[in-house]
C-alpha cells in the first residue's frame, strides 16, 4: 500500500533518509509519496550520471548465445570468447523453464508490494538471520550519494534455513529459481573451466566456483529526476558468475572493454544476462574479465531484476588457479580469503573496478 506521507512533510534531507533508510520505506515508499523532485542525497556527481554520454553511439552489443545444443563446441567457444572480450553475454534456450522465471518475477513484485511493517521484519536490525536482508541503495552509511534501488538479499544455506528465515511470500519461487538454474550454471562453469585446463568440476573446483549462492531481488521504482541519479552505480560483481534475470524495462549498461563506451543490455524475453565476477577474474589470473556495469534510473516505469550470485564458499582461499599458472604465467593476484574480499566490497560505496585491486600483487 502507498505511504500516505505528503512530500511537504520532508523539510530537510535528514527526514528523507529517516523515512527511506531507517523507517524502511525504501525508495519505493518515497516514489509512492508522489515526490516531484529528487532529494539532494540522491544527486550523483556529474561524472557518475553519464546519461547519454558514450551510450548507444556505436552499434556494439554484448553477444547473445543460443544454448539449444549445449554440447556443441561452438557454444563453449562462444561463452569463453565472450568471457574474455566482454565479461558479459546473454543466453537463450538455456533450459530453465520460462514459468520458473515468470514465477520469481511475480514473487519479487509480491514481496515489494508488502506493507512496510512486513518488509521491515527483514532489515539488518530486525532480520532473524544475517543471511536475509531487506535494504536500500548499496551501502547507505558509506555512500556520499545514495542509489535509487531497494533490495532483498538472500544468502542460501539450506532449504531448512530458508524455510525458517526467508519471507514466505517469495521463498518457494526463489528456491525453485535457484534449483532450476543449477544445471545451466554448471554447464557454463564447465566451459569456462575446460578453457583454463581444469579437466573436471570435482568437489574442490565446485566449491571454488559455485560453493555459495546469493540471490538478490532488486526493485527500482519510478524516479522523479532519473538523469540526476543512478539505480546502481558503476561496479563489478564479486561473484564468480552472475546469472541475471531482468524484466522488459531495460536500463542495465555495460562498459565495453574494446571502446570504453557504455553499452545497453536490451531485454530479451526468456533470456538470462550472464556476467563474470571478480572471483572468476582472480581465479583465471585475469583471462576472464569482471566488467563494470551500472543501472540507470527510470522516470516512467518501475523495474525489477533478480541476480543469482554464484560464488566461492566464504571460507575458500582464492587466487590464480594452479592449472592457469602451470605454464609459467606470472600470477597477478595474491591468495585471499573470499569472505574478507566480500566484506571489503560491502563496506564501501560502489567504485567501479577498484575492488579487485584488493587482491592485486
Ligand atoms: C546490495 O546491492 C548490490 C549487491 C551486489 C552484490 C554483488 C555480488 O557479487 S554479491 C555476492 C557476494 N558473495 C557472497 O555473499 C558470498 C560470500 N559471503 C560471505 O562471505 C558472507 O556472507 C559475508 C557477505 C562476508 C557476510 O558475512 P557476515 O559477517 O556473516 O555477515 P554480516 O556481518 O551481516 O555482514 C558483514 C558486512 O557486509 C555487509 N553486507 C552483508 N550482507 C550484505 C548484503 N546482502 N547487501 C549489502 N551489504 C551486505 C554489511 O555492510 C556488513 O557490515 P555491517 O557494518 O553492516 O555489519 C552488487 C550491486 C549492488 O548494488
Ligand atoms: O538490475 C540489474 O540489471 C543489475 C543489477 C546488478 O548489477 C547487481 O545487482 O549486481
Ligand atoms: Fe552487478
Image (tube, rainbow, N blue to C red):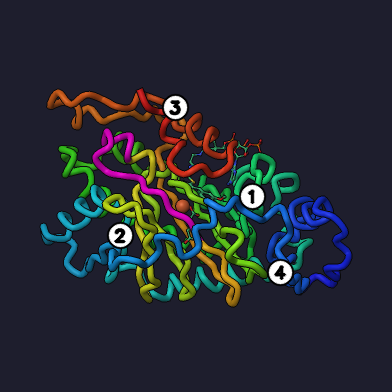
Q: Does residue 84 lie above or below 110 as drawn?
A: above
Q: Does residue 328 lie above or below 270 as drawn?
A: above
Query: Circle 3 — which element?
Result: strand
Does the numbered disc 3 mark a residue whose Cβ is under 8 Å from ligand 1?
no
Q: What range of the chain is rendered magenta?
A: 281-295
Is residue 94 visible in the rendered image? The answer is: no
> Which labelled disc corresponds to residue 133?
1
Report the side of 311 relative to 77 (left or right).
Answer: right
Query: How would you classify the magenta stretch by its main secondary structure?
Result: loop
Does the numbered disc 4 mark a residue whose Cβ is under 8 Å from ligand 2?
no
Quadrant housing residue 171: bottom right
For image coordinates 18% across by 58% down, the residue present is 78
Observer-side mark, 2 or 3, equals: 2
For image coordinates 74% across by 72% down, the residue present is 36
How far apart are the alpha carbons under marks 1 and 3? 23 Å
Whichever of callouts 1 and 3 sits on the residue coming sooner in the sequence is: 1
Observer-side mark, 4 or 3, equals: 4
**Marks 2 and 3 close (CB-CB < 8 Å):** no
> Which labelled disc corresponds to residue 31?
4
Query: Circle 1 — which element?
Result: strand
Quadrant housing residue 225: bottom right
**Marks 4 and 3 close (CB-CB < 8 Å):** no
- Look at mark 2 in the image and give the residue it sits on: 89
Observer-side mark, 1 or 4, equals: 4
Does the numbered disc 1 mark a residue whose Cβ is under 8 Å from ligand 1?
yes
Quadrant housing residue 274: bottom left
Query: Circle 4 — which element?
Result: helix
Q: Does residue 85 lie above or below 287 as drawn?
A: below
Report the side of 315 relative to 38 (left or right).
Answer: left
**Marks 1 and 3 close (CB-CB < 8 Å):** no
Amino acid at each position: 500500500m502507498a505511504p500516505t506521507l505528503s512530500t511537504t512533510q520532508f523539510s530537510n534531507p535528514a527526514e528523507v533518509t529517516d523515512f527511506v533508510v531507517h523507517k524502511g520505506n525504501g525508495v519505493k515508499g518515497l516514489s509512492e509519496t508522489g515526490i516531484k523532485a529528487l532529494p539532494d542525497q540522491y544527486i550523483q556527481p556529474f561524472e557518475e550520471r553519464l546519461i547519454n554520454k558514450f551510450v548507444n553511439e556505436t552499434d556494439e552489443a554484448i553477444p547473445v548465445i543460443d544454448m539449444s545444443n549445449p554440447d556443441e563446441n561452438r557454444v563453449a567457444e562462444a561463452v569463453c570468447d565472450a568471457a574474455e572480450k566482454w565479461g558479459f553475454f546473454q543466453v537463450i534456450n538455456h533450459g530453465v523453464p520460462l514459468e520458473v522465471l515468470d514465477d520469481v518475477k511475480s514473487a519479487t513484485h509480491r514481496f515489494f508490494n508488502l506493507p512496510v511493517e512486513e518488509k521491515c521484519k527483514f532489515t539488518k536490525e530486525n532480520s532473524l538471520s544475517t543471511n536475509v536482508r531487506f535494504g536500500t541503495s548499496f551501502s547507505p552509511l558509506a555512500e556520499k550519494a545514495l542509489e535509487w534501488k531497494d533490495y532483498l538479499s538472500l544468502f542460501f544455506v539450506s532449504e531448512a534455513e530458508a524455510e525458517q528465515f526467508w519471507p514466505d511470500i517469495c521463498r518457494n519461487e526463489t528456491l525453485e529459481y535457484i534449483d532450476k538454474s543449477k544445471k545451466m550454471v554448471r554447464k557454463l562453469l564447465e566451459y569456462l573451466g575446460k578453457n583454463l585446463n581444469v579437466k573436471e568440476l570435482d568437489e574442490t573446483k565446485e566449491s571454488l566456483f559455485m560453493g555459495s549462492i546469493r540471490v538478490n531481488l532488486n526493485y527500482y521504482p519510478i524516479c522523479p529526476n532519473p538523469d540526476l541519479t543512478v539505480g546502481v552505480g558503476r561496479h563489478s560483481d564479486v561473484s564468480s558468475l552472475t546469472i541475471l534475470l531482468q524484466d522488459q524495462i531495460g536500463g542495465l549498461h555495460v562498459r565495453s572493454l574494446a571502446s570504453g563506451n557504455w553499452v545497453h543490455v536490451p531485454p530479451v524475453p526468456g533470456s538470462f544476462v550472464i556476467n563474470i565476477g571478480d572471483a572468476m577474474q582472480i581465479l583465471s589470473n585475469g583471462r576472464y574479465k569482471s566488467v563494470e556495469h551500472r543501472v540507470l534510473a527510470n522516470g516512467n516505469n518501475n523495474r525489477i531484476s533478480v541476480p543469482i550470485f554464484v560464488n566461492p564458499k566464504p571460507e575458500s582461499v582464492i587466487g590464480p588457479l594452479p592449472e592457469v599458472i602451470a605454464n609459467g604465467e606470472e600470477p597477478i593476484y595474491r591468495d585471499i580469503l573470499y569472505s574478507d574480499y566480500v566484506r571489503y566490497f560491502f563496506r564501501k560505496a560502489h567504485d567501479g573496478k577498484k575492488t579487485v585491486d584488493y587482491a592485486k600483487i
